[in-house]
Image: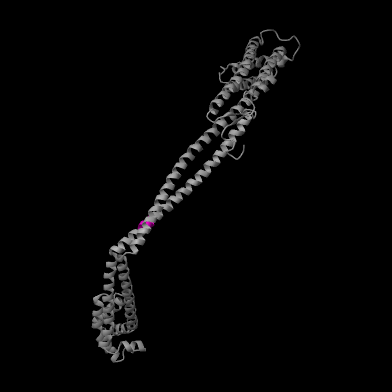
């Protein structure tokens, strides 16, 4: 019997040596193998079910006969006899409870039920039944024989269950590998389609950049753009001159500031509030470099005489050549600073006007449009390259998943068919033939 069980789940060489099966036919082959496995297991279980059921019925009948006939006439200790007679009902009850089971049709569930039934019976035997052999030796011996018979059948079922589980697990592994392979193939096909769309879009964007670059070059060669660049060169010269005037004005202010601050202190000491307010306002305006404010030149003029009064009476001494060259006279002082301020401000306004004109110049607008258009497309290409990189990473992952699936299918099919069947189309997917 055991030899038959051992041979039961060995792969059946129903296919010719080195035969192949297609991926499309593989699911049906797996279904057939699964059904054959379950059928063979059920056949073995059916044989054991009959033997186990007969033994179970024999035990039930034995329980009915337990204690009916007079026990052995051999003398036993009264206490032992009392213990046996007290434990017999408990033993019978526990065994009856263990045997009172409605067996399932499913082999796995049935196997579990038998294991639990045997466990319950032996618990009864080890518990209240452990002394019964003193009075009911023949009955206990028969009970053990019947339980041993059921145990032997359970051992056969254990082997059958183990082998079937291994084979069914292999069949499921092939199914899972096949599903993994198909899912990867489907996603790879989708990825290839997406990659083509990305490549086509990138090629289109690159053509647009080339066209915009040519249009920009043609625009730069136009007379309109040359007129714009000439005006831009004039503006640059004006801006340079404006910066030079500002630096000259700023140098004069840096020279004048110490004199203004000394004048402010004198006005504060002499409590000349009006002069103090004017000088403080002038200093604040200068520190903030608000030279374009008309109030600045007015303050220069309105504070000049009070400053020179203090210079003349030497309350404000001139300490260096810069101060002496600036504060020569009221007229010279005001002319230098206000003239520099007005000259700078006039040129700065002119620069601003030309800057606005250049900003709205048609040639400038067109050039900026070309530049921004090219920049926007370059950003779009960069974003597309990043997405393509992610897609490439996903493709590599899917290829590895395919390789794993192929290995699973190939190895499990080798075990299932005793190396007699290979799956066409996948054996070289991981570099092996």
Residue at point 46% right, 40% down? 190
Q: Height in image: 362 above or below 321?
A: above
User: Magenta part mainly helix, strand or loop?
Assistant: helix
Residue at point 32% right, 64% down? 222
- Residue 91 appears in the picture as rendered: yes
User: Closer to the camera, 133 or 18?
Assistant: 18
Q: Which residue is at the far right?
A: 74
Report x, y in % for residue 329.
Answer: 27, 89
Asked where in the image residue 283 lies, by quadrant, the reply is: bottom left
Q: Height in image: 384 above or below 174?
A: below
Q: Is residue 417 left or right of residue 342?
A: right
Give, as a single range, the part of the protein colored magenta. 372-376
Q: Is residue 222 left or right of residue 155?
A: left
- Please count the marks in the image: 0
Report x, y in % for residue 258.
Answer: 34, 83
User: Closer to the camera, 378 or 204?
Assistant: 204
- Residue 83 appears in the picture as rendered: no
User: Closer to the camera, 68 or 344?
Assistant: 344
Report x, y in % for residue 380.
Answer: 40, 52
Q: Height in image: 17 above or below 359?
A: above
Q: Which residue is at the far top?
A: 69
Q: Is residue 256 magenta?
A: no
Report x, y in % for residue 72.
Answer: 73, 10
Quadrant in which the C terminus is drawn: top right
Asked where in the image residue 282 lies, by quadrant, the reply is: bottom left
């Amino acid at each position: 019997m055991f030899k038959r069980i051992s041979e039961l789940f060995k792969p059946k060489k129903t296919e010719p040596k080195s035969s192949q099966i297609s991926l499309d036919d593989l699911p049906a082959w797996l279904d057939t193998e699964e059904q054959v496995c379950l059928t063979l297991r059920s056949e073995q279980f059916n044989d054991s079910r009959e033997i186990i059921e007969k033994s179970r019925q024999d035990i039930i009948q034995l329980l009915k006969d337990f204690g009916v006939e007079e026990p052995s006439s051999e003398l036993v200790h009264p206490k032992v006899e009392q213990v046996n007679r007290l434990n017999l009902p408990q033993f019978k009850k526990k065994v009856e409870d263990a045997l009172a089971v409605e067996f399932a049709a499913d082999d796995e569930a049935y196997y579990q039920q038998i294991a639990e039934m045997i466990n319950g019976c032996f618990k009864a035997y080890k518990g209240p039944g452990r002394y019964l052999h003193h009075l009911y030796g023949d009955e206990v011996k028969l009970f053990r024989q019947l339980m041993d018979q059921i145990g032997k059948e359970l051992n056969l079922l254990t082997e059958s269950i183990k082998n079937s589980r291994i084979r069914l697990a292999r069949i499921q592994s092939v199914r899972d590998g096949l599903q993994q392979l198909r899912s990867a193939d489907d996603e790879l096909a989708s990825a290839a389609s997406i990659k083509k769309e990305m490549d086509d879009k990138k090629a289109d964007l690159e053509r647009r950049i080339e066209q915009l670059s040519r249009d920009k070059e043609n625009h730069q060669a136009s007379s309109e753009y040359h007129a714009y660049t000439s005006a831009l060169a004039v503006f640059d010269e004006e801006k340079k001159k404006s910066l030079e005037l500002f630096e000259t004005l700023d140098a004069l202010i840096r020279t004048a500031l110490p004199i203004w601050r000394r004048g402010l202190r004198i006005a504060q000491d002499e409590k000349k509030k009006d002069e103090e307010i004017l000088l403080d306002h002038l200093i604040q305006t200068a520190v903030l470099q608000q030279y374009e404010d008309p109030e600045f030149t007015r303050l220069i003029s309105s504070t000049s005489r009070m400053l020179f009064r203090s210079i003349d009476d030497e309350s404000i001494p001139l300490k260096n050549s810069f101060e002496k060259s600036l504060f020569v006279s009221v007229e010279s002082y005001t002319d230098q600073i206000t003239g520099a301020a007005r000259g700078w401000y006039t040129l700065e306004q002119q620069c601003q006007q030309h800057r606005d004109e250049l900003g709205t110049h048609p040639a400038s607008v067109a050039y900026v449009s070309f530049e921004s258009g090219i920049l926007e497309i370059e950003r779009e290409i960069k974003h597309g390259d990043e997405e393509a990189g992610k897609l490439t990473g996903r493709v590599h992952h899917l290829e590895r998943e395919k390789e794993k699936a192929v290995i699973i299918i190939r190895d499990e099919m080798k075990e299932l068919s005793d190396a007699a069947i290979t799956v066409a189309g996948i054996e070289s997917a991981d570099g092996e033939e």
